[in-house]
Amino acid sequence: MSVLIIGGGQGGYQTAFSLRAEGYGGSITIVGEEPHLPYQRPPLSKGLLLGKQQERHVFLRVAEFYEKQNIRLISGTHVQSLRETPVSYEWLVLATGARNRHLTCPGAEHALYLRTLDESQAVKQRLEAAASVVVIGGGFVGLEIAAAARMLGKDATVIEAQPRLMARVAAPEVSQYFREQHEARGVRVLLNSFVERLEPNAVILRDETSVQADLIIAGIGVVPNDELAREAGLAVGNGISVDEFLRTSNPHIFAIGDCAEYPSRYADGRVRLESVQNAVDQATCVAKAICGKPEPYTAAPWFWSNQFDIQLQTAGLAIGFDQTILRGDPTSNKFSVFYYREGILKAVDSINQAAEHMTARKLIAAKANVAPDQAADAGFDLKSALL
Amino acid sequence: MSKITYVSSKGVSQTVDVLDGDSIMEGAVQNNIDGIVGACGGCLQCATCHVYVDEAFLPKFDEIEPEEEVMLASTAAERRPNSRLSCQLRVRPEFAGCIVTMPDSQ
Ligand SMILES: Cc1cc2nc3c(=O)[nH]c(=O)nc-3n(C[C@H](O)[C@H](O)[C@H](O)COP(=O)(O)OP(=O)(O)OC[C@H]3O[C@@H](n4cnc5c(N)ncnc54)[C@H](O)[C@@H]3O)c2cc1C
């Protein structure tokens, strides 16, 4: 009995933890290429950059945990091929995550990226000496970095190619609110802006505008680490393809977290998600399957992002929506947006509304339908839709 | 440094030193204590660091903020009057000797 886990991030760690919690008595090995104990990424663009959170608190567990639980951790080792893994296995779990997409424009080497602890430390160090920071990409991570830079007193600019922030995942109302909040706190937001080239201390846009920057950071999305699966001949789409049990096309090999594309009952099709919830819940599901209790993966997606003192929380998946309903008043800094497709509730974004978000998680998981006019009515009790 | 005692749901207790300023959740992680998960890292997203605080120490901690209140409604184990999320309990010297009991599920 043996499990090999490739990738020692959020999902890899959780698989090992959940296997032991389920009583798995076989050998467990985690091989990870980073030279650290498994750690959490959310603080890398938030508390850690701001110096509010100490580095020792990003690690999911101390070294003693792995010894006591008899989990073998091989760090600093990149697995090249599934034909020559460091140990043999009965079950293999691919939890290889994703890596940052890199800029390809001239001068691209002047940009930093933020995915790993080492990169976060490098950005933090460079931030100290910088007066001006340009973030390329107005998604969650980019906006969190811009907020941190601004909170540290830096001149901060966000450059986004789309006509609005977080365009891939958020409704226009949410994009607009975050733009206003960033601008109100002094972040310069440049939309519809395309990067032509980078210079050591400037970003040059297609219209030849030059934006001064002591530090350039790019957050332009990620690419799933699916090479091992590809080379082994496993099915790969936008990430490693798995079925509802998170099995790849080889039933002894699972894939979870940022690297895996799975059929979701919350989207009408296959998705690849990048969130702590997804990595943790998929790891738990796979651990159960290995322990002889296979169940389809059905956990409802949720996510959070903190920018300045604003908290955005999402329940469900806002994919392919055709109607959005605003609940509450953005000028009060507390509101939600309900996303519908063909009249069916698909997702809820809540801003500074933790209680409403927690109700939304339950609504989404239960596939309860709050009608659009009910969602729009602030007096309507959302919980009544759960009964 | 303050001594904090963590009692498992089966009644096994472990007393460890927790750095002042660390949360009781962080103290559990640093000292490799089972029974507290803290999946979100302490930012009130997951309610997996639920503990029952010894009644004698309960009044010493800061009051429950609305955000913690919301998450306490979603704990896996039963919520009791002395339920707290341990990521919100920052250790100070006057908490030395505090006893927290961990629920059987997080
Ligand atoms: C800056 C930042 C902020 C974030 N903030 C949030 C947030 O606020 N909320 C939220 O829900 N999510 C957030 N996320 C997303 C979340 O952290 C990820 O979805 C989660 O870490 C995915 O876990 P994973 O195990 O799939 O991948 P990862 O945690 O990325 O781990 C994969 C590991 O596998 C290793 N690896 C890859 N290939 C190999 C190989 N061939 N051999 C050996 N090792 C290999 C990688 O080096 C890496 O260490 C954030 C992510 C980032 C980068």
Image (spheres, coloured by chain):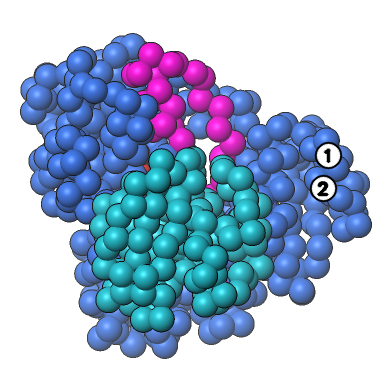
Chain colours: A blue, B cyan
Mark 2 is on which residue type? Leu
Mark 1 is on which residue type? Ala
Relative image position of residue B40 (x, y in whole percent): 45, 54
| Residue A157 is one of the magenta-drawn residues | no
- Dot 1: element: helix
Q: Which residues are magenta?
A: A281-309
In the figure, is residue A277 to the left or right of A345?
left
Q: How many marks?
A: 2
In the figure, is residue A373 to the left or right of B81?
right
Mark number for residue A308? none
Q: Chain of mark 2?
A: A
Q: Are marks 2 and 1 in contact (CB under 8 Å)?
A: yes
Mark 2, Cα crowd under 10 Å, few <14 / some 14-19 / many 20+, is some
Q: Who's the residue at 72% across and 39% down the image?
A: A363
Mark number for residue A382? 2
Q: Quadrant of residue A113?
A: bottom left
Residue A336, visible in the rendered structure: yes
Quarter of the image where the N terminus of chain A is located: top left
Q: Who's the residue at 82% across and 47% down the image?
A: A382
Q: Who's the residue at 79% across and 37% down the image?
A: A386
Mark number for residue A385? 1
